[in-house]
Image (cartoon, rainbow, N blue to C red):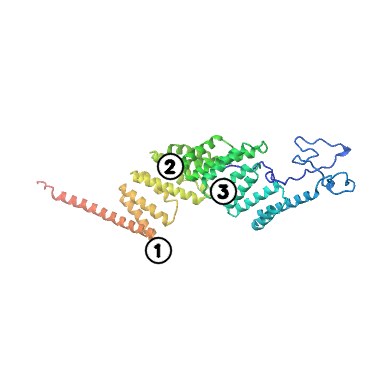
Amino acid sequence: MLTGALSADVPAAGRVAGTNAPAARGPKPAGGQIKAPPAGAPSAGTNVDGQPHINPVLLEPSPLVDGSNLVRALHGDQSARAARAAFEQQLVVARQLRHDLCLPQAKYKLTTLLESPGVPDDLRASALLEMAQISDQENQPLQALQIYSQFLHTYPNDPSVPEVLLRQGLLSRLVGAYTNALNKFFAVLSSSLEVKEDNLGYYQRLVLRAQTEIAETYYQQGDYATAAYNLTRLLKLGSPDLNAAQIRFKLILSLAALKRYTEVVSQAKDFLKQNPGQAEEPEVRYQLATSLKQLGLNQEAMRQVLLLLQAEQAKSAAQPAAWVSWQQRTGNDIANQLYNEGDYSSALQIYQSLLTLNGSAAWQMPVLYQIGLVLERLRQPAAASKAYDQIVVLGGNLGTNAVAPSLATLKDMAQWRRNYLGWETNAIVAARALEHGMTSTNTPAVAK
């Protein structure tokens, strides 16, 4: 529900310990004068992390500086430096294997690293997070949750704690542990309050993401009232990082589930105005039309249905199946309601528009049957018989083997109604003729 990546302004290695490279040293300027570094740059004696920097050339053993005046070598234990470099290389290789989806090999490398003695804490923490990522990629959410818990227990003050909590919340919800998921998302909010000002933008997006997931969790639980409350609060934030279209869409669905139709109408109109052409537009129009119908605004509801049914092909080109599905559902639902309420003219207008959406017999035959029933109610038996005739023809074209049982039944019903209308019409004509004949017989003769 965020418009950008969570860690958009975090350096590539900002959340992976032990990967900071030493600051590069440039050539000495002419004249032997060293220019002052630009504002904010590390000093000449430090690396990019502000740690003391020693040129690798000077770290090599040299008889000139080797001596017995110090108990320890001038540059410390070189074996420890070499061991760290080896551990770092193992981590880099394991990460590349994971990226290449060589997950068993990556897991083996990481397990070996974690079981090795003397691994620095920062590299061990990174290895644990890599293992959790592998479990997630292997669709093992419970295993990933366990590894993240181990990380939080071992490194409670690590800067990555808020995002690890977020990931735990997402995984918990994935396995249906909604209460635990909510606890983790709320923990993100509290833990992010304790972070330093470094990478403030990242932590602000992290908090915003947790807020959206709290609302999403309530929505997935079916607690639509609490979901609507949280979604409304999110929209009021007006954050440019928020995917407002998605938030408003979920709010519309929550309000519809609560039967708060007036609010659905307001939010749906705002959505359609602010997000034209979105993939969710047909479903939003369905909710809008249905809510208007529930509020007794039949004409406005019918207008929305017709707007959806007459939507330009360009709008539905990206997801034609989804658009047609919502067009059919919306039109059918509203037309059926209008028919049941006796508004036959409005129902007929929608049914006739529905007829153009799909040329298959499976769609055309039921719609034509509804049109026939409406025309009967409008006392247009000839037009109704024509609709039933079309059904019989379509059913006959399907053949005896290909026709579905439901369509075969529909064909039989249409044929029966057509025959009934023919009998009824003939009976009315005969009755009128008989009535006319009796009237002529009973008329007194005119005296001459």
Say which of 351 and 13 sits in front.
13
How much space separates mark 3 and mark 1, taking CA atoms?
A: 52 Å
Q: Earlier in the sequence, mark 2 or mark 3?
A: 3
Question: What label sits on residue 171 in the rendered view?
Answer: 3
Say which of 58 and 390 sits in front.
58
In the picture of the structure, the residue carrying the numbered disc 1 is 399
Q: What percent of the width, then of the height, locates residue 303?
A: 42, 41
Q: Earlier in the sequence, mark 3 or mark 1?
A: 3
Query: Which residue is located at x 49 percent, y 52 percent?
Result: 321
Q: What percent of the width, then of the height, locates residue 89?
A: 73, 52
Front label number (1 vs 2) = 2
Callout 2: SS? helix
Instruction: Spot the residue most to the right.
Output: 64
Q: Earlier in the sequence, mark 1 or mark 2?
A: 2
What crowding class fits label 1: few (fewer than 14 Cα within 10 Å), some (14-19), or many (20 or more)?
few
Q: Amino acid at mark 3?
A: Leu
Q: Are marks 3 and 1 in contact (CB under 8 Å)?
A: no
Instruction: Tell me: 49 left or right of 182.
Output: right
In the picture of the structure, the residue carrying the numbered disc 2 is 289
Toward which corner of the image does residue 44 lie, by quadrant? top right
Q: Amino acid at mark 2?
A: Ala
Query: Which residue is located at x 64 percent, y 40 percent?
Result: 202
Callout 1: SS? helix
Instruction: Tell me: 78 left or right of 447.
Output: right
Query: Which residue is located at x 59 percent, y 46 percent?
Result: 167
Instruction: Spot the residue most to the front.
Output: 71
Question: What label sits on residue 49 in the rendered view?
Answer: none
Instruction: Tell me: 179 left or right of 22.
Output: left
